[in-house]
Amino acid sequence: MQTEAIVARVAPALAELGLECLGVEWNAGHGGGLLRVYIDSLRHEGDAANAVSVDDCEAASREISALLDVDDPIPGHYMLEVSSPGIERPLFNASQFARFLGQDAKVTLKLPRDGRRRLRGRIAVVDGNRIGMDVDGVQMDIGDDEIESAHLVPDWDALGYTPKPKPGKAPNATKGKKAGRTR
């Protein structure tokens, strides 16, 4: 399955709807597969009022479905899912990494580097198709063609979703043990 060919095919039609095709994921399964297409609004620019809506996903789904019915690039049965990028936005290429300089990302490499395939770090620089990330205090230079998958790591504190300890509960309290007793 050439996901790049599908992106190239559907991107112009989505642009006419005011949408950007961020990328495509293919998950093969028994009796078929799942084709997930991530879209974003071309007008979004961080403005929640212009974020992708359910109506946008429905319109994109109809358009993509019609295009894929004509071209038929996927043999057999499959499900089409059109999705907004969500809070853990997937990153498919270097230009998408460049939009989020200074933010944290998780990256899974196609092949291990220094014994690791999974990396987490700050996006420090993007130069062409090369992505520089600060991973555990070390600058790593990664080509976007070396990446199997990547997504942003949300700043839960900034979003106000950091869990707070329950009132009256001491952190790291040991349940069921009484102080001062030994056996």
Image (cartoon, rainbow, N blue to C red):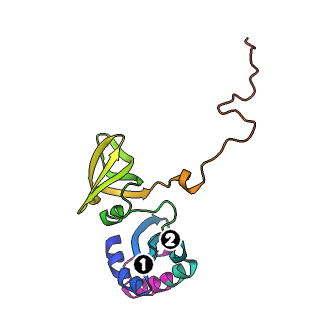
Residue at 40% x, 87% y: name it: 16
The residue at which mark 1 appears reads as: 42
Three-letter code for the amino acid on which mark 2 is drawn:
Ser
Look at the image and tell me whether residue 1 can be seen: no
Other-residue count near label 1 (Cα within 10 Å), few / some / many at <14 / 14–19 / ≥20: some
Whether residue 40 appears in magenta in the rendering, the answer is no
Image vertical order of residue 146 relative to residue 183, above or below: below
Relative side of 51 to 15, left or right? right
Residue at 32% x, 75% y: name it: 5
Which mark is first along the chain, 2 or 1?
A: 1
Which residue is the extreme one toward the top? Answer: 183
Give how far across and how far down residue 114 sits, in percent. 28, 40
The magenta span reads 60-83
Decide: marks 1, 2 in contact (CB < 8 A)? Answer: no
Split into 4 quadrants, where in the image is the N terminus?
Answer: bottom left
Q: Secondary structure at mark 2?
A: loop
The residue at which mark 2 appears reads as: 84
Three-letter code for the amino acid on which mark 1 is drawn:
Leu
